[in-house]
Image (cartoon, rainbow, N blue to C red):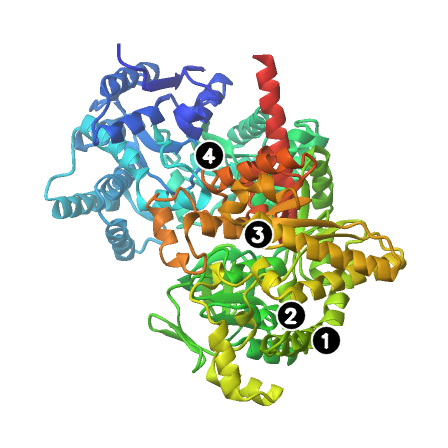
Amino acid sequence: MAKKYVYYFGGGKAEGNGQMKDLLGGKGAGLAEMTNLGIPVPPGFTITTEACNEYFKNGGKYPDGLWEQVLENLKKIEKEMNLKFGDPERPLLVSVRSGAKFSMPGMMDTVLNLGLTDKTLQGLIKMTNNERFAYDAYRRFITMFSSIVMGIDRMKFEELLEKKKEEVGARYDSDLSAEDLKELVEEYKKLYRKEIRQPFPDDPYEQLRMAINAVFNSWNGERAKTYRRLHGIPDDLGTAVNVCTMVFGNMGDNSGTGVAFTRDPSTGEKKFYGECLMNAQGEDVVAGIRTPLPVEKLKEKVPEAYEELMEIYKKLENHYRDMLDIEFTIQEGKLYMLQTRVGKRTARAALKIAIDMVNEGLIDKKTAVMRVDPEQLDQLLHPMIDPKAKAKKIAKGLPASPGAAVGKAVFTAADAEKWAQKGEKVILVRLETSPEDIGGMHAAQGILTARGGMTSHAAVVARGMGKPCVAGCGDLNINEKKKFFTVKDIKVKEGDYITIDGSTGDVMLGQVSLVQPQMTGDFATFMQWVDEFRDMGVRTNADTPKDSKVARKFGAEGIGLCRTEHMFFEGERIKAVREMILSDDVEARKKALKKILPMQKKDFRGIFRAMDGLPVTIRLLDPPLHEFLPHSEKELRELSKEMNVPLKILKERNQALHEFNPMLGHRGCRLGLTYPEIYEMQVRAIMEAACEVKKRGIDVKPEIMIPLVGHVNEIRMMYELVDRTARDVIKRKKVDVDYLIGTMIELPRAAITADEIARYAQFFSFGTNDLTQTTFGLSRDDAGKFLPFYVENKIYPEDPFVSIDTNGVGELVKIGIERGRKTRPELKVGICGEHGGDPKSVEFCYNVGMDYVSCSPFRVPIARLAAAQAALRKQMGDMSKSTV
């Protein structure tokens, strides 16, 4: 017996239901559920997603029994409607629509009025006594079938339509007469024959088969594939196909069609919100050819249908307990529902709807927390492009740090600072950024780079600062020397306005208007609920008191990563750092470090005050020393003059520090072991600052982190140095400060030998940016050249720098935690890579037993929500296990 591939709905009863989205797709499940609720739905049937997947497996052939089931269910519609498919007297017409499990608006295909031929057209005219309507339906069908099923450019049909309207002086399509439409149909058929070299198909069953194939094939269309990639929808779900009796909104002034939401999708306000058109089909509302009317206008035009629509939308919202997006058609005064699905909404609306529905008793707090997508919260924290604004997009890069920014293009960090001091708003445009650009990045409204990926220096720093950033925009040809960039034939010079959208990766010409985020009381209420269910900590990555305050405002429970190297670039201290690097002996280095110590101490005091009562994890110097020296001839000459050091010596020192692969070179604890005086100075600055603020009543909790440990002997020697220095400060200052010494696990060897390392480390913080690089053998700054190709072609399921690679990097993390806690059961474990703000990665961290995640300040609310959802999902999983 053939497998069941087709599910019928009609006559007040459906074979499927609303829970069957996997099999029937969202649209099919919605039609079945509405039918079972006694809501007027035109009868039809759904071909399952399994049939679609079998079709692809069979090389474009139907699985056994599918076509027979289609014909059998077509007969059920004929019986219910008292019409016959292909009949010249009483023809049945159908729509053929796609419908995947997840809503993908406008990504796949729909064909309306299928079953019309020259013969059935005459039957439709007789049945309706409306020649104009019948020809209008026929010309629409030819357009849709030709463009969607046969791939003819739709614009060719639109051009013929516009030409006809011009000829007869018609403003709208609805102004064309039956005679005009009859002529247009003949022109359309001629165009079809010219393009396909065959007459338009006059067998309705052939039309149906071809339309079903087209909907199946649209699952693998470029639009659909791109949409799935951007929204993380798997490629193997397939689409269902819904074949539904046609109902017509274009049968006159008592007919119409519309789309509505049960609440305002923009604000979340509890009011029916939608648009409709009279004497039109559904495509007209979407196409924007005519200006739609507010849905309330139906009350005047078709009062009975309007009242019924009001009852139905309330019934559906109460049933689904969510805000819904619905489609309807009114045929000669009678209402039919064509779709219901959970409606897409802005972040602001999502919070308001969730809170209102809890207050209305429709849902509980757990459901409200589970219903908001963590990534959506980003919208509430950053300026966005005004949805109504017109924008000229000129290039696209990676959406590296969310939010939108407008400013004048500048090409050096120094210029960004100089222009910003004059009150100019600037966008810093660079091939790629380096730690030296930190001042210019801070001064700029946003950052645009031609190279680098989602975890490049520009991306990581921009996210930390809450600045919009578009990275890896390969279309840009940047001439930093002459201060301009080109994209194809467009040239943007220094001082020209550009707009970037770090949420989409778009680069736009000129000033595009922005809308500022609105932090409402709903946000605070919602985040309070989130924390009721969250049992994993959320910290922040912050290097300044300002960032620390921002993160604390967003609910951070401490600092999980404070990078000390960023402090080295500010103001006068870079000179002292360079003096230290250029020193030939330990004493000279110590002399230079003495100048840096009070500056570092001041930074730490500010951070400790901002984080009063919360832990602060400070990473000792990590990058190689050459990053603190300039590289160009011009900059070296300037430095030579400034420091009174011969240019030759500077060049030699630069050469001596040069590394072929600095990521794996003389950095991290390797630097601390070979130049112990650097780490001694930093530990002294940390502990002196801690003692001083504690004297002033601040509850201080320093955690000192040693980077890039790969061997137990490295951590042993570093632990001794840090502990000895810390004790010495405490003794001198006569203040008792509790501190922890731990390490960053960012090398595969460290994870594998974590049991040995844990003998000296009181906490582990997984640096998954570097752990991903060293596990995959990738440079995150160079991987932008091929990573998009890898992700697009499914070589990697997703970018491993965006979401943690659970099978590889994740296994190393698990091993590290298990082995570390075997040696030290109370070992505190967190993550401080960029993955700490990615919802999927947060869930992974929760499931492997981490104590906290740490992320950039503006990702803190997102991580809090993701952690709460992970806890609730686990709770639900445990409950379902206990009931089995």
Is 831 or 71 nearer to us in this picture?
A: 831
Q: Which tag, 2 or 1, sits closer to the chain's start? A: 2
Left or right, 515 with respect to 496, comes to right
- Single out the mark in the foreground, 1 or 3: 3
What is the three-letter code of the residue carrying label 1? Lys
Q: Which residue is mark 4?
A: 327
Q: How many marks?
A: 4
Kind of residue at badge 4: Glu
- Characterize the local packing of mark 4: few (<14), some (14-19) or many (20 or more) Cα atoms within 10 angstroms: some
Q: Residue at x 71, y 38 (%)?
A: 531
| Amino acid type, label 3 | Val
Q: Residue at x 65, y 64 (%)?
A: 676
Q: Earlier in the sequence, mark 2 or mark 3?
A: 2
Neighbourhood count class around disc 1 (C-alpha, 10 Å): few under 14, some 14–19, many 20 upward: some
Q: Position of residue 536 (x, y in %)?
A: 67, 38
Q: Nearer the viewer, mark 4 or mark 2?
A: 2
Alpha carbon separation for disc pair 2 and 3:
22 Å
Please name whichever residue, 305 or 519, is drawn nearer the observer in this view of the structure: 519
Camera-side mark, 2 or 1: 1
Pointer 4 or 2: first along the chain: 4
- Which residue lies under the disc numbered 1? 595
Residue holding disc 3: 709
Q: Is residue 37 above or below residue 779?
A: above
**Amino acid type, mark 2:** Phe
